[in-house]
Image (cartoon, helix red, strand yellow):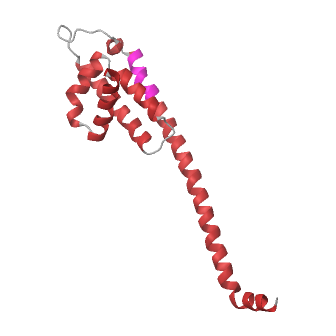
């Protein structure tokens, strides 16, 4: 017992420092984890808000309703400038969502795949995608192309 007390007398400050350092590391880890979870939830809420605002345009501008058509004759009625602009915004929105998913957001990659596949298989979105994909992030292009391939197979 005397040896332990003697050791404690000689090393109490080092022991206290060590406990303080370990405690602060644990506290920092817990705080970082909570902050990451909060940030992900905030990112999801922001993306949802942008999603709602973006798609609200389709309801406010009836000329955009054609983008949902499953059969469109793009030769007799090519993609309009308004449709192309809107779809470029949608593609940027998809890219943002894909980035969030890639960073471990609360979004599901499988949900993202289904949404991309469903949307980019429509004739007008597909035409704008084919026309603009060369100017986009190559990893994102690969993701969308893989989604489209999965539909064909």
Going by the image, does 126 lie left or right of 55?
A: left
As drawn, the residue found furthest toward the right would be 1
Placement of the N terminus among the 4 image quadrants: bottom right
Going by the image, does 127 lie left or right of 122?
A: left
Q: Is residue 58 magenta?
A: yes
Give the x, y percent position of residue 76: 18, 7
Give the x, y percent position of residue 151: 34, 22
Placement of the C terminus among the 4 image quadrants: top left
Give the x, y percent position of residue 143: 33, 35
Query: Which quadrant of the view contains residue 79?
Result: top left
Rendered view: 4 above or below 40: below
- For the record, the magenta segment spans 50-59
Going by the image, does 138 lie left or right of 109?
A: left
Magenta segment, prevailing SS (helix, strand or loop) = helix
Rendered view: 68 above or below 6: above
Give the x, y percent position of residue 34: 59, 51
Going by the image, does 13 lie left or right of 75?
A: right
């Amino acid at each position: 017992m005397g040896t332990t007390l003697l050791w404690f007398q000689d090393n109490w400050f080092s022991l206290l420092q060590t406990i303080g350092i370990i405690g602060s590391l644990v506290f920092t880890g817990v705080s970082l984890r909570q902050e990451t979870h909060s940030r992900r939830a905030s990112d999801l809420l922001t993306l949802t808000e942008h999603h709602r605002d973006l798609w609200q345009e389709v309801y406010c501008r009836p000329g955009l309703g054609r983008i949902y058509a499953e059969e469109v004759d793009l030769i007799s009625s090519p993609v309009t400038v308004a449709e192309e602009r809107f779809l470029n915004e949608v593609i940027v929105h998809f890219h943002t969502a894909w980035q969030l998913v890639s960073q471990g957001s609360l979004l599901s990659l499988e949900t993202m795949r289904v949404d991309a596949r469903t949307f980019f298989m429509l004739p007008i979105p597909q035409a704008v995608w084919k026309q603009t994909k060369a100017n986009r992030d190559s990893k994102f292009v690969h993701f969308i192309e893989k989604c489209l391939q999965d539909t064909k197979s």
